[in-house]
Image: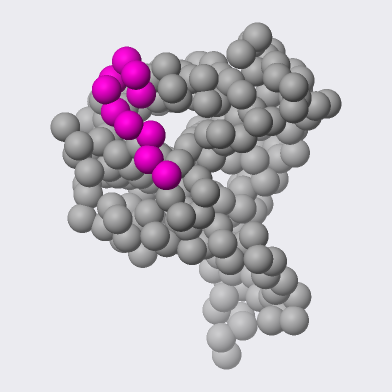
Amino acid sequence: MLGPVLRKNDRKIVPYSELIFSKKDLTRAEYFFDFSEKVCDVPGVFIECGFGLGNSFMVITYFGLKQNRKIYGFDSFQGFPPLSQNDIGSMSSEKSKSGAWNHTSFEEAENKIATFGYAPMYKSNIFLEPGFVEVSIPRFLEQNLDLTVALLHLDLDLYEGYKVALHAFWPKISIGGLVLLDEYDDPKWPGAKTAVDEFSKQMGVSVQSHPSGKHFLKKTK
């Protein structure tokens, strides 16, 4: 019987009738499928900065595992750090404040990985890196000196997070690798665009657009 085998391996059995796919879910899957295909021959891991509810991370994990890669998820798991002046704009709301977006604890993130059936790969191919990226990324890089990155998804919302992640990870991006910019040009998060524009000007790399309306950077040299 398949059921007992799946349960023994921490796989949750969910009735098909309980699977609800929104247009946003399908668009997200198509978006990440496209980018994962673009880097299929590029060496390196997949990284997401900004786990949030974990929906994008699970899609990235699916495509990363199909390519036999390691996948890392960074998040404070305690909401936003203090905001900078670059993050305050006309579209800012109550969501744009310190401590906001505290939706998922570290334990809940681990449970989500297990719910999707990935418990056997957790801490061998799938990793979570807790803490504000200003601290967690430098610590991670010190522990992974030979790291190469094929795909980096930035979903950090704020100026300082984008700035830190871009400058820290860019040297680790393989030639042909991609950096996906979730909030670029989103008026609710002006700091993200400011950080990306500053970085792209400094590094001489162009921000490119995708048919989905999202933006990305490609490392060519």
Q: Position of residue 137 (x, y in %)?
A: 44, 23
Q: Tell me the quarter of the picture where residue 200 sits.
A: top left
Identity of the residue drawn at 59% across and 40% down: 51
Residue farthest to the bottom, as pictured:
1
Q: Is residue 201 magenta?
A: yes
Left or right for 21, reference 94:
left
Q: In this view, does 23 lie above or below 217?
A: below
Q: Is 125 rendered above or below residue 24?
A: above
Residue 48 in picture, x, y percent from top left: 48, 40
> Where residue 74 sits: x, y (%)?
52, 34
Q: Nearer the viewer, residue 197 or 37?
A: 197
Residue in view at x 34 percent, y 19 percent: 201
Where the C terminus falls, by quadrant? Answer: top left
Q: In which quarter of the image is residue 140?
A: top left
**Residue sitting nearer the eye, 185 or 143:** 185
Q: Which residue is drawn at 61% across and 53% down?
A: 55
Q: Please state the extent of the stretch shown in magenta in the rendering.
A: 200-209
- Residue at image x 40%, y 25%? 166
* Above or below: residue 78 compared with residue 59: above
